[in-house]
């Protein structure tokens, strides 16, 4: 897949099936003060071939039912520590949106998320996803500012004074933050710091 080197569309479907379909409902049932490093009920094996789509349909049906039954304010464990079920609602909307774009691009048709969802995904990336990736890698890149010209917002990625700024429309920023191409963003300042942050997702969560 162009946006996810080393992945196939089937890999993305399997990833959503178990990471989101099974994992997120399990996380919502896990106590907020859980101390396990990974309380998610990961499967011991993944379906392949003709079993992929039936597994996706079954797990996602259960996931949707769990989301509909859950109170967003219910305390639970999250990747970011103690939180509420709303964390998983937001994470699911963003992750499915991103991977839908990935799968559509693989078929030759580029779909986009709604602008409001895209802008929220940029914020979530800066506040959660990239800091998590940096923690996984054990690195602390210099802080940079991320300016979204779609809504006029600026948000800081990292701690301390900003050593650079990246600027672009929301959809372009989202692609860059998730390692899907940085050619169309404007960079002002320390390019080394920018490169460090924009390589975090691929380095921390690569399937290769």
Image (tube, grey):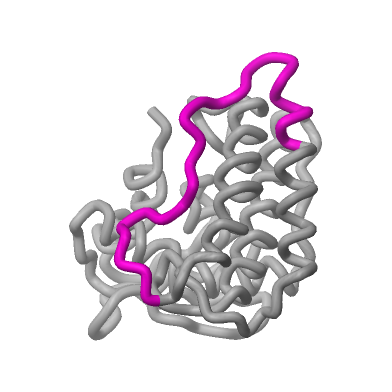
Q: Position of residue 57 (x, y in %)?
A: 79, 38
The answer to whether residue 126 shows anywhere in this view is no
Residue 52 shows up from this direction: yes
Q: Quadrant of residue 161?
A: bottom left
Q: Residue 90 placed where, x, y %?
A: 64, 69
Residue 206, image quadrant: top left
**Left or right, 113 with reference to 19:** right
Location of residue 80 with respect to 181 vertically, above or below: below
Place of residue 122 in the rendered image (x, y in percent of width and height, measured from the top left)? 56, 69
Q: Residue at x 34, y 59 (%)?
A: 197
Q: Main secondary structure of the magenta part?
A: loop
Q: Quadrant of residue 144?
A: bottom left
Which residue range is magenta in the image?
33-56
Left or right, 157 with reference to 123: left
Check the image and report above or below for 81 versus 103: below
Residue at position x 77%, y 39% in the image? 58
Q: For the point 44% across and 69% down, which residue is it? A: 128
Q: How many marks?
A: 0
Quarter of the picture containing the C terminus is: top left
Question: Quick one: 4 or 77, which is closer to the camera?
Answer: 77
Q: Is residue 94 magenta?
A: no
Q: Is residue 42 left or right of residue 28?
A: left
Q: Position of residue 178 (x, y in %)?
A: 49, 52
């Amino acid at each position: 897949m162009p946006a996810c080197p080393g992945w196939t569309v089937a890999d993305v479907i399997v990833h959503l099936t178990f990471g989101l379909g099974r994992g997120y409902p399990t996380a919502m049932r896990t106590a907020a003060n859980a101390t396990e490093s990974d309380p998610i009920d990961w499967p011991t094996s993944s379906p392949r071939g003709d079993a992929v789509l039936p597994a996706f349909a079954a797990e996602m049906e259960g996931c949707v039912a769990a989301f509909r039954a859950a109170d967003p304010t219910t305390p639970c464990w999250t990747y970011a520590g103690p939180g509420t079920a709303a964390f998983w609602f937001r994470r699911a909307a963003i992750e499915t949106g991103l991977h839908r774009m990935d799968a559509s691009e693989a078929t030759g048709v580029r779909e986009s998320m709604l602008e409001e969802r895209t802008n929220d995904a940029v914020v979530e990336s800066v506040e959660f996803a990239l800091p998590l990736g940096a923690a996984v890698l054990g690195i602390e890149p210099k802080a940079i500012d991320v300016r979204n010209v779609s809504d006029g917002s600026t948000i800081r990625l990292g701690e301390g004074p900003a050593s650079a700024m990246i600027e672009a429309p929301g959809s372009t920023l989202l692609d860059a933050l998730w390692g899907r191409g940085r050619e169309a963003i404007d960079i002002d300042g320390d390019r080394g710091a920018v490169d460090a942050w924009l390589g975090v997702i691929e380095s921390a969560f690569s399937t290769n």
